[in-house]
Image (cartoon, grey):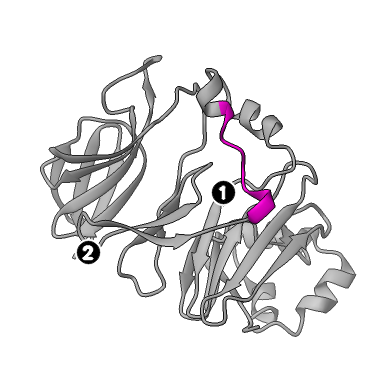
Amino acid sequence: NEIVLCGDRKMSFYTIEGKFVEKQNVPLRSWNIAALGDDYFGFVPDRFHRGRMDSVGKYKLIITNREGAIIDRKFEFPYYIISGGHPEFIQTNTNSGYLFAFNYDLNIYQLGPGPSITVKYAIDFNQYNPDTSILQKEQVEKMDDLYKYNDTKMIMPSGIAETSNTLVLRCGSNKHQKLAFRLINLHSRKHKTIVMNTPPKPGFFHGWPIYSYHESNGDYVYHPLTSLDVLETLHSLSEEQKEKMENCQGFTELINLKEDDNPVLILYKIKDF
């Protein structure tokens, strides 16, 4: 077992105890990295390096070996776009790989174990599926152009989480400007939508952030916060919000938290439905 840190065109390897092992160069700048096992790594490349798109930036996913050599390029961009979102790797509930999705692609993919890629979920929003015809008609210079063109449509999720019973998609239409979570029961295929609009700002649940459903384990999704973030959040809670949170497990322990204490995990259990 090792810890791998990815910097500007470099991967640095450390033991679990923090001892430096080696450093390897990689031929790309990356927004995200996934350790796939068997010394394979997945990267989301920076599409534009020094103002131009190179041969690596034409692809949404790059797979390398431990030595940094590219062994595969996946998902070539079908259109030219100056700016756009970058998918995040979210570990599967069974820790067997990583989930990821792209804007205007109705599939959710699994990367791993190893360099394998499969379609794990195919999503259909019916009449709310995004219209991609603009991509074949003209050059799209900014992702905002696509958002405006699909004002009332669903964009593929910017956040995904997978629990033992539920697939959670963070997505919504720009028309309403509200954070929405689509919950899909993996057993019954029932689904429902939760729209968040709680004070002090959208994306908070009684004052606590839930906007990044990017990690999950077992029946829970979780969001990590530094102790300083927790203390600042506690300070901003209204009395009504504090009363609602007092029955939540672990809330009273946060009162005695210090700034240099360990990070805190905020866990949310997705109830079966």
Residue 17 — which label?
2
The residue lying at 42 percent from left, 53 percent from top is 100
Label 2 neighbour load within 10 Å: few <14, some 14-19, many 20+? few
Count of numbered marks: 2
Q: Which residues are magenta?
A: 126-134
Q: In the image, residue 3 lies at what x, y percent?
A: 25, 57
Q: Please say if 140 is above or below 90.
A: above
Does dot 2 land on a helix, a strand or a loop? loop
Q: Give the residue type that dot 1 points to.
A: Met
The percent coordinates of residue 266 (x first, y second) are 59, 70
- In the rendered image, is residue 262 in sight? no
The answer to whether one can see residue 210 in this image is yes
Circles 2, 1 touching at the beta carbon (< 8 Å): no
Say the numbered circle drawn on residue 38: none
Q: Nearer the viewer, residue 253 or 121?
A: 121
SS label for mark 1: loop
> Is residue 132 in the magenta section?
yes
In the displayed structure image, the side of residue 176 where residue 148 appears, left or right: left
Dividing the picture into quarters, in which one does residue 249 lie? bottom right
Residue 16 location (% of width, % of height): 22, 64
Residue that appears at 78% across and 42% down: 175
The residue drawn where x is 56% and y is 35% is 132
Amino acid type, residue under disc 2 in the picture: Glu
Residue that badge 1 annotates: 156
